[in-house]
Amino acid sequence: MKTAIVVFSDPKSGSDEAVGRLFNALAAAYDLKQKNEHVEIVFQGAGTRWAGVLTQKDHPAHALYKAIQDKVVGVSSGCADVFGARADAEKNGFSLITTNQVPGTSGLPSLAAYAKDGYSVLTF
């Protein structure tokens, strides 16, 4: 079993819903990791902004993030550009994903590649 988890929730919304979606995405990754299943996490859209938040030690999801950090593939390069998250992503060591060369962008993750490779794709 292979699973790709894509986080779209926006930390700037300041809502419990955004944090809840993030927490559940990370918890799903943790569960799969503990069961030795293949899992990858990608931050896309406004979710790229988490790159500047999750690394803060006082954030409620920081400990969970640290537990699954090795499963984070990176953030969407094009989305990081649009949502102002590129500097935080680079500063905090997140890879910029460019596998889907969408015109007018620096590239996004290819969800088609995940599907073709047999991944279940979960979105949060």
Image: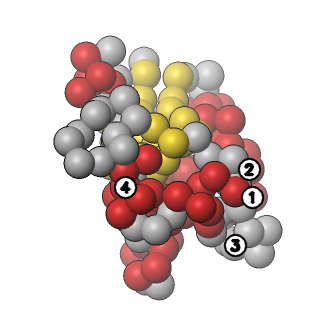
Query: Which mark, residue 63?
Result: 1
Q: Is residue 58 visible?
A: yes
Colour scheme shown: secondary structure
User: Would you name the residue on which mark 4 appears?
Assistant: 79
Q: Residues within 10 Å of mark 2 (few under 14, many from 20)?
A: some
Type of amino acid under label 1: Ala
Q: Earlier along the polypeptide chain: callout 4 or callout 1? A: 1
Residue that label 2 marks: 66
Dot 1 lies on which element? Answer: helix
At numbered mark 3, what does the secondary structure look like: helix, strand or loop?
Answer: loop
In the displayed structure image, the side of residue 65 where residue 105 appears, left or right: left
**Residue furthest out toward the right:** 57
Which numbered marker is on residue 59? 3
* Residue at figure coordinates x 41%, y 82% from the top left: 13
Residues at discs 3 and 2 in contact (Cβ within 8 Å) = no
45 to the left or right of 73: left
Mark 3–mark 1 distance (CA, rounded to whole Å): 8 Å
Element class at badge 2 = helix
What amino acid is labelled 4 in the image?
A: Cys
User: Which quarter of the figure is the C terminus placed in?
Assistant: bottom left
Q: Position of residue 30 (x, y in %)?
A: 61, 42
Q: Are marks 2 and 1 in contact (CB under 8 Å)?
A: yes
Q: Nearer the viewer, residue 41 or 48?
A: 48
> Is residue 8 at all visible to an observer of this figure?
no
Category of crowding for the residue at label 3, using alpha-carbon neighbours closer than 10 angstroms: few (below 14), some (14–19), many (at least 20): few
Q: Position of residue 50 (x, y in %)?
A: 54, 63
Q: Amino acid at mark 3?
A: His
The residue at the point 74 percent across, 69 percent down is: 56
